[in-house]
Amino acid sequence: MDKYEILKKYFGYDSFRNAQERLIDHILAGNDTLGIMPTGAGKSLCYQIPALMLGGITLVISPLISLMKDQVGALNQAGIHAAFLNSSLTTTQYVKALSFAKQGRYPIIYVAPERLVTEEFLDFALSVNISMVAVDEAHCVSQWGQDFRPSYLKIVEFVKRLPRRPIVSAFTATATKEVKEDIIDILQLQNPTVVTTGFDRGNLYFSVITGKDRYGLIRSYLKTHRNFSGIIYCLTRKQVEEVWERLRKEGFLVTRYHAGLSDNERRTNQDDFIYDRAPVMVATNAFGMGIDKSNVRFVLHFGMPKNIESYYQEAGRAGRDGEPAECILYYSSKDVITNQLFIDHNQDNQDLDDVTRAIVRERDEERLKKMTFYCFTNECLRDYILKYFGEYGSNYCGNCSNCLTQFEQVDVTEIARALIGCVASSRQRYGTTVMIDTVHGANTAKIKSYRMNENPYYAVLSKVPTYRIRQVLNHLQLEEYLFVTNDDYAVVKLTMKSKEIMEENKQIMMKLAKALEKPTKEAQVRSRKKRGGQLGKEAFTEKEESLFEKLRALRTETAREEKVPPYIVFSDKTLTHMCVVKPKTKEEMLKVSGVGEFKFEKYGEKFLSCIEKFESTQN
């Protein structure tokens, strides 16, 4: 079979997306390859299809058991023999899997990096034909990446010990220029073909919400999205426990995941989420890598992650099927303090020398600062993320909270001058709260003890609301007119640009939301529907909505019988396409995206019958 026949027969697609075909062709030509593609762009097909055409065995290096389990389960459901080798197998199961692998039963084998240089695995690897080593989540090889895993350094040692060097391909969803260079250098890719398809996920809606009652906001969101699956990320285990317990008591079907739970409970809770027994997962960042659940319709952050890489990776677990999904970050200034504590007490870099450890810390702090700026920028949120990864757009996506808010340009020069003047006259000794309280004229014990009530800028902005002063202070940081240190006591400092405002009379204009013209939630929903339909489905008629629910119920029942996650049977996108096409025959069903021959043989007639019965009741 050629690549198109494999794509249709096993995966149910008629054509390749984005750069998939280009990457596959380079691999089939025998070239080392690096693919940088956003989550949901179909990276796995880029090595799975060549694996079925190269002959021999393709080893897929994968960081987490959950990722392997999901990928192997999906392949076997599609009619492709695959296996995984990791610590979840008993000794007997591991030996049996290696025996079958030696017999050539599996063209694709997923393996944990820790296993590569063990005597038992090397004995196997040296006795078979390994045609390709595919490194998934390749950013894990870089200490500059957001998820460095020292075990990934074993990959190069393993490849060198093979009698014949296989093709080496590497894939990741998030990589800055430095991380991309690290992947190429550390994995020793030979004249690699590098394909970057871009980081944009157009189906994701981004929003940042600042509010004191974050739990209340999340609870309200879940009440209006009860039929959807999603993830709620928290910064700490304590937050996970509190949010999970409160939601559970209020009747939501939720589960939890963090490193403080036993292996068995984490595994059980993850399965409950995957199989939709508990469609909402409350978790720390310990959860998610490798979770290939395609029907996650929202990712909510109860707190700001430590960097843009982590946020985009976590948010990217929504909408993997390409259907609309929402990514909402609930921000509090306390999140900055929490993340700084994580940086201060980071134990992951203890093996590094002092100089390198100091460089890593400095970079972590710079990343935290850029993540913080994301939370209070008034520019397009999508564009902010893309610029971070080196891409530049129009600064208007039409699918983020900032683009859906009406703004006006406001002259904030006088506020800016007062703040910078206050910082200078106090000899750059105090933090943001003291600066704001001083210019606003607060009569607090702290202001008096610091004698800031005697400062020449005391109360000069007494008629300006404190929230507006804080907005301008944040803007001055964002534009580098002021700098806030990351010390134990964050202090506001002047920069080289500060004098532009004080000495050169530079005018400072700032985009601010029109207080009375911010669109309602209903208006935002209507706007998003115009751009591609309601959350998770195309713009359905009431009839199609009813059919979708029938098909989803059948999928749940089928998944329970097969003991597989519902999305493994058919994705939400495939069910959506069925509702639009309404196939009546096998030929028509095979035209539905995601329905291949193998899946039709297993499930096709059952779903055709469901559609036929539904249609008959509508006439």
Image (cartoon, grey):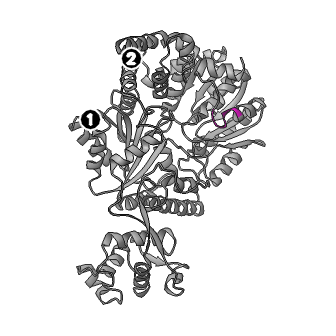
Q: Label 2 vs label 1: CA separation?
A: 23 Å
In this image, 560 relative to 88: left or right?
left
Q: Quadrant of residue 611?
A: top left
- The residue identified by callout 1 is 252
Bounds of the magenta segment: 17-21
- The residue identified by callout 2 is 554
- What's the residue type where badge 2 is placed? Leu
Asked whether residue 15 appears in the rendered view, the answer is yes
- What's the residue type where badge 1 is placed? Phe
The spot of residue 490 in percent (x, y) is 41, 71
| Mark toward the start of the polypeptide (2 vs 1) | 1
The spot of residue 298 in percent (x, y) is 40, 40
The spot of residue 588 in percent (x, y) is 55, 15
Compared to 44, does 245 lie above or below?
below
The front one of 389 and 529 is 529
In this image, 352 relative to 510: left or right?
right
In this image, 274 relative to 139: left or right?
left
Q: Quadrant of residue 258?
A: top left
Please give the label number shown on residue 141: none
- Within the magenta stretch, is there residue 20? yes
The front one of 519 and 218 is 519
Residue ranking furthest to the left: 249
Q: How many marks?
A: 2
- Within the magenta stretch, is there residue 274? no
